[in-house]
Amino acid sequence: MATQSIERAVNTEVQLMMTCLCDAFYAGVAEATVRVLEAAGCRVHVPEDQTCCGQPAFNGGDFESSRKIAQHTAKVFSGDLPIIVPSGSCAAMHLHGNGLQFENAPDEGQMGVRSLAKRTWEVCDFLVHGLGKTTWPGRLDRRVAIHDSCHTRGSGTGAAMRTLLGSIAGVELLEIGQAEQCCGFGGTFSVTFPHISTGMGTLKLDEVHAKRPDMLVSGDMSCLMHLNGLAENQERALPHCHAVEVLAEALG
Amino acid sequence: MPNPIEQYARDLSEETREAVRKSGALTTGQRVEILQKDYEDPDALRRLAGEIKQHTIDHLDSYLEQAEASLTKAGAKVHFASDADSARQCVLGILQQSDVQRVVKSKSMATEEIHLNPFLEKQGIETVETDLGEFIIQIDEDTPSHIVRPIIHKKREEVAESFEKHGLGDYNTDPETITRRARVHLREKYMQSGAGITGGNFVSAESGRIVLVTNEGNARFSMAPNKVHIAVIGIEKIVPRDRDLAVFLNLLARSATAQQLTVYTQFIKGPRMPSQPSGPEEMHVVFLDNGRSQILGESCREILRCIRCGACQNVCPVYRHASGHAYRAVYGGPIGAVLSPLLGGKASFPEYADLPKASSLCGACREVCPVDIPIPDMLLKLRHKGKKQGVSTPGSFPMAPFATLATSPTAWRTAMTAARAMNYLPMKLAPIKPLRDWLGDRTLPKWRGGDFRRWLKTRKGNNADA
Ligand code: SF4
């Protein structure tokens, strides 16, 4: 989903959207996001009633359900503070998906959903293109392979991630081959198409391992959950984490 | 029951999969290279092409009229066919009028779409495909599995076998030998035929020029010795002006085959002029609607910008894994997943409603499309359409309960914590088969529901708040 650069709210007081995946599985990523944002001088609010961006229902074509979830999210994240998300995919839901599912809907029916698109940032994109950070402190001697998640196509995330990670002393960034190819997760896609999804993931893992990295880093835990799940079964797991976890680790 | 595309992919031989994947990956890489070498901002060119095409289809009624007038002025006869059957009858009528018994054809997806060959054969008219790939498809009684490379799914050995079987020489897998033999065979067919049937890549409304691109020159051969030329062209193939062709021709070959230009690019304006030594005396253009004007009135109209380059097929990981035939229709891959459910209108929508699900919505297709069609958006809209119409396809998960949970924060938080039980359940006993299949190949991370929320609350010197 293309999320071409648009004018969005910038502020050092921000709201964190932790994502349902971090809520359920990856508490460490949400914690790292808070620490990284604070290190960048932000005050972070975490609205307690947040749940999910609605993408699972949206991707299933059930717009009736996903619109309700989007409206709930708009209510929880009301106001005009930037909304920071440690996921390119959930950010794309706000920046692009909501526009599609509310296409032709009158303003009042949207109940604030439209405002989400003007305030939502994927976290690395925000640090670099919102706050203007170009370097990151610390030292980590590591060869890091980057997996660009599909929903960050056309967004500032890829460049931002490389800027920040690449500026940490000792980090060597590795570009994997056929980077435009999807890892094969795609939410329910991987459940309905397990054979195809596994095939896609296996090809991705081949490309990753070809670079002999110390670790695999991405801006979306969903890709990494899928890839690591496969890799473990194929007995070729490698350390993997979200880009903000690397940034947090570099902070010491 | 698994989704049919998943099933097809499972049954596909690894050899075929590898052939399709390699070819797709190779062309995808070369496409990027040539576009970046030749243009500073290829995406700007794609957007421009998309805008020109969108403008054209938004005003298709008037451009069609203009094209008809220009073509007529150039001496061509224009016919309109509302559906496949009327298009076939129209072609048959033209052939019968000139008492044609044999026709040669150059590659055309529009004629594939209306299944012209079997129809003409049934009417006793010998119909010979002259594009090498399509020729092989024809003698094998197969169907194309890729828009640009119809035999992408075939091995050289298979081709050698069918040539031998059809009396086209001894078993030989050398591509050059195969090509030479086909050429010799086809030369004769060109000379014996009474009409040449082609498609049309573009029609300029301004001049009535139709443009044909090929790499084998077979479209020229199909026309030169024949008295009658029939071009079957989808109504969406119109562009406003001749100068617009520059944009499209530059993009088409680069996107399709990573060439700057195809080997042959023909601009045809009307039948042969008295000053020309050869060429058809009659030229007919059959404009094919076949569901297109209905698509124009719907929310996925952007799909009519398509210039049939096949780049979305080449880049698509699902297409690469399952191959084109998995899509059960003339058009496979991302373009097919959108077109097939729409082309047949209301009646056939349910039959193809599963196709838009065969995508991880990765968006690679949109990134390569020379006319910037937002294919993933169309796939989502078609999923929504299927949901609204209550069409059940394998892999439709009920999402209403999830929506209820995701809009009830207290219940959500409880569920997050309660689901920790998952850590103690044997996952291989998952209640539904697809989930079991999924978990067969993967492991899940440990459930840590609610941990972050607890961390926030207990954190010393907490700067973040709830
Ligand atoms: S949809 Fe776009 S990429 Fe696919 S065949 Fe058509 S023009 Fe080419």
Image: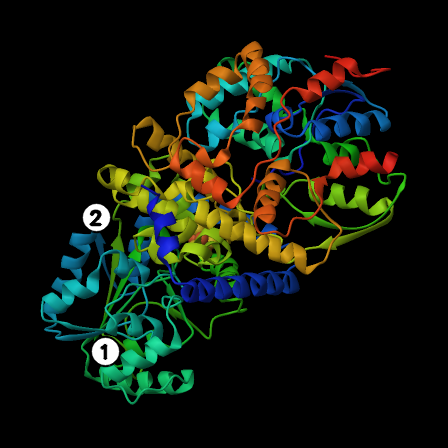
Are the residues flagged by discs 2 and 1 from a single subunit? yes
Chain under disc 2: B
Q: Tell me the kind of residue under disc 1.
A: Asn
Image quadrant for the C terminus of chain A? top right
Residue A188 percent location from the top left of the image: 47, 36
Residue positioned most to the bottom: B170
Residue B393 percent location from the top left of the image: 32, 36
Residue occupying the point 62% across, 13% down: A49
Pointer 1: what residue? B226
Depth check: give the residue in front, B410 or B262. Answer: B410
Please identify, in this view, whether the residue under mark 2 or under mark 1 is nearer the observer. Answer: 2
Depth check: give the residue in front, B106 or A222. Answer: A222
Figure check: B281 above or below B337: below
Circle number at residue B412 = none
Image quadrant for the N terminus of chain A? top right
Residue B119 percent location from the top left of the image: 15, 62
**Mark 2 burial class by Cα count in 10 Å: few <14, some 14-19, many 20+:** some
Pointer 2: what residue? B82
Q: Is residue B151 left or right of residue B376?
A: left
Q: Image quadrant of residue B270?
A: bottom left
Q: Is mark 1 within 8 Å of ligand 1?
A: no
Depth check: give the residue in front, B348 or B42. Answer: B348
Q: Is residue B214 left or right of residue B251?
A: left
Depth check: give the residue in front, B424 or B35. Answer: B424
Q: CA distance from mark 2 to mark 1?
A: 27 Å
Asked if one can make out residue A230 in the rendered structure from this viewpoint, the answer is yes
* Model colouring: rainbow
Q: Tell me the kind of residue under disc 2.
A: Ser
Chain under disc 1: B
